[in-house]
Each structure stands twice: as structure tokens, then as C-alpha cells.
Amino acid sequence: MHDTQIKKLIDAEKRRQKNVINLIASENYVSKDVLEALGSELTNKYAEGYSALRYYGGNEIVDQIENLAKTRALTVFSLKPEEWAVNVQPLSGSPANVAVYLALVPQGGKIMGMSLDHGGHLTHGHKVSITGKMWTQVPYGVSKETERIDYDALRELAVREKPAIIVAGFTAYPRVIDWAKFREIADACGAYLMVDLSHTAGLVAGGAYPSPFPYADIVTTTVHKTLRGPRSALIFSKKDTRGLPVKIDKAVFPGMQGGPHLNQIAAVAVALQEDAAPAFKKYAAQVVKNAAALSDELQKLGWRIVSGGTDSHLLLVDVWMAGKGIGGKEASDRLEKAGIIVNKNTIPNDARSPVDPSGIRLGSAAETTRGKKEKDFREIARKIDKILRT
């Protein structure tokens, strides 16, 4: 690379990534093949529109790439093409979620999503997001006693508020979700059921977490978390008499964005082929085992884990209660100085500010990619304990 300043910074970031323990639940490490696709000549091609329906010429090859990415996306989740469609053009998870609302929810209509401080995402209708400015959020949360979803309370709220769409799937909820109950609740109030699978998509693909596809109308997911792909997103929509795939496609283009990033789509296709390999099932299972080991060891050391544990790749640690006055920001800063990267995070019913909340969020996916097993995560827990209690 002739740009020595950028080259030095890239090299510095490589060294940083190599020398830390990465417990960011939203991050992972892609293969060299994924990086090669991202840095390919596909960056040069502009292909506004969809396969066989482009507004520019020269698309014979990139049409094949986009179609291959779609086929692989359906395959990795064991979906039949006559039952499901997938859009592979969203640039990332937030635009994908916005596109779904744009397609299916009238402006000002109700989005029923988990509140941010209980584990939801900004794009589930939070007021600071465009999703809370264009639509109205009907927020739900977890039980104060169990810190898990109370499905009876959820149903009561949905029937009373009658949202246009219910969003299931979260950014900081560690437990298995009862997709069937969400389906029943959506049917009871006449809402679409959208699942934001961004965090657990790789676990579903690997058979380590229940699949929402038998129950959902729409499933969105990022590709860069547990699927170990590039920063991108997918929108799956059920084929039925409501015409969901057509509505979704129109919302993505021309509704939300112009030409797709074909290098990104090719990298998605590469990652999805890797996700369909037998080795990925072992990886997904190990991710869940490692998170459980981390959670169990921290609890043995006296730390409170939100909801009492985890069923997935992530867990929330209440550092304020057990840390003798340590807030989430201070805990994150201390750990980073010691080479362990986490993120500060609110916990359910948090009395502290999101800028310095009571908790931290830990994830096992990235370090599992590096080959770590349960014993390694138990050792990481002991390191965390030592750093935060010093």
C-alpha cells in the first residue's frame, strides 16, 4: 500500500486485535477468504437494482454472485426457496430493520419492541433512532423478578395496543426465546412477527439455538456476529399471499438505498458457505459452552449474572452490585487497560445512566473462533475478577 499513514494504522489495528482478549458480543473474526472477497475488483462495479433488473449494463457476473449469495443464505438456514425469499443487499443490520418497517408499517404506526435498557436495540423503536421518530414504539421488557420475558404480560400488552409489527430478537438478552409464544401473541393482535436474529443467527445456523423460521413472517440478521461474515445484513421474508418479498425488495431499493455493495455481497456468500460446513456446527456448540463456562465461573467468584446465566453467546454482568461501586464504564476501562475488551451495558431496571450503566456485556463468539475452550473461558473469568476487584 502506497498510503503509509493508513498502512501503519491498519497494521496497528492488526496488532491490537492480535494482542487482546475480545469479549465484544457483536464482533468476530472473518476468514482470509472473506477478506479477499471484500478487497476484490467487485468494489468497482455499480449494479443498481436486482438480478436481471439492473439499471446499468455489465452485470452478467455480479448477477450470478448475488443469486449465489441468496441460495446460500436459504441453504444455511434449511429454508425452501418456494417458501422463503431473501434480500442480500442491506448494508448492515439497522438499515435492514428500517427497510422492514418502511415496507410494512404505516408512518406513525406501532412497533412493539423490547426497550433498550432491557436488552432491545435502538432500531426496535427507540426514540433517539429514526425508528422512534417515524413510528411509535410500544416498549416491552423483562420481569423484574426473573429478568426474563413474561409472555403473559407481553400478550396482554400486544392485545391492548394492537401494534402493526412485533419485534422479537434482541441485542442483550441472553436466554432462549420462545418463538412459538411470540407467534401466538402476534396472531392474537393481528401483527406481523419480525425476528431480529442478528446476535444468534450463527447459533441457529449451527443448530445450537432454536430456529425462528417456522414461526416468523420476517427475519433480519447481521452477518458479522455469530455468522462470522462481513459487516452486512440479510432480510428473509415468507412467501405467501401478502406479497412480503416484493414489499421488502422495494423498501430496500429504491426505498432505502441505491447500488448494492457487490464486494460485500460476495463476502457474505463466502461466509455463508463456511457456515454450511460441518465444522461450523462444532463451532456454534462450542460458543454456547464457552459462554456458559464464563458465566458459571463468574458466579462462583461472586458476580451477579443477569437472569442467572445464559443460553447463548452473551451474558450481562451486574458489576455495580457486586463490584463495590464499580460502574460499567469504569469496569470496561479497567479491563481494556489489561487487554480484555468488553462493552458497558445497561441491565434491566438499571438506575444508572446508559453513559455509565450498572453492567458490562460479554460474548464468547470471537475468542471461540480463536480456538478457546471452556477451561480458557474459566481462566478469563478469573482474570476479570482479579482486575475488577483490585
Image (cartoon, rainbow, N blue to C red):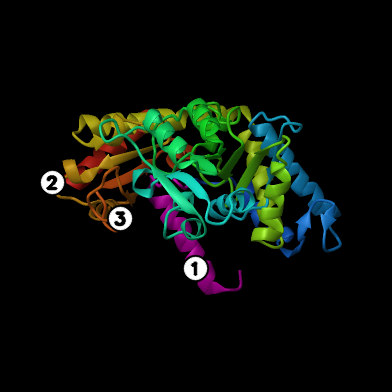
Is residue 266 among what the camera can see?
no
**Which residue matches tag 3?**
354
Residue type for callout 1: Lys
Say whether disc 2 or disc 1 marks the residue closer to the N-terminus. 1
Residue at the (43%, 46%) spot, across then down: 138
Say whether disc 1 or disc 3 marks the residue closer to the N-terminus. 1
- Labelled disc at residue 376: none
The reply to whether the magenta stretch includes residue 67 is no
Residue at the (72%, 31%) spot, across then down: 83
- Labelled disc at residue 8: 1
Q: CA distance from mark 2 to mark 3?
A: 19 Å
Q: Residues within 10 Å of mark 3 (few under 14, many from 20)?
A: some
The reply to whether the magenta stretch includes residue 15 is yes
- In the figure, 141 relative to 180: above or below? below
Q: Residues within 10 Å of mark 2 (few under 14, many from 20)?
A: few
Residue at the (54%, 37%) spot, across then down: 201
| Boundaries of the magenta span | 1-27
Residue type for callout 3: Pro
Position in image of residue 214 (x %, y %) = 60, 27
Q: Does residue 155 appear to the left or right of 298 in the view shown?
A: right
Of 309 and 102, which appears nearest the observer?
A: 102
Position in image of residue 25 (x %, y %) = 42, 44
Q: Secondary structure at mark 1?
A: helix
Position in image of residue 175 (x %, y %) = 40, 31
Residue 255 figure quarter: bottom right
Q: CA distance from mark 2 to mark 1?
A: 41 Å
**Which residue matches tag 2?**
324
For the residues bearing labels 2 and 1, Cβ distance under 8 angstroms: no
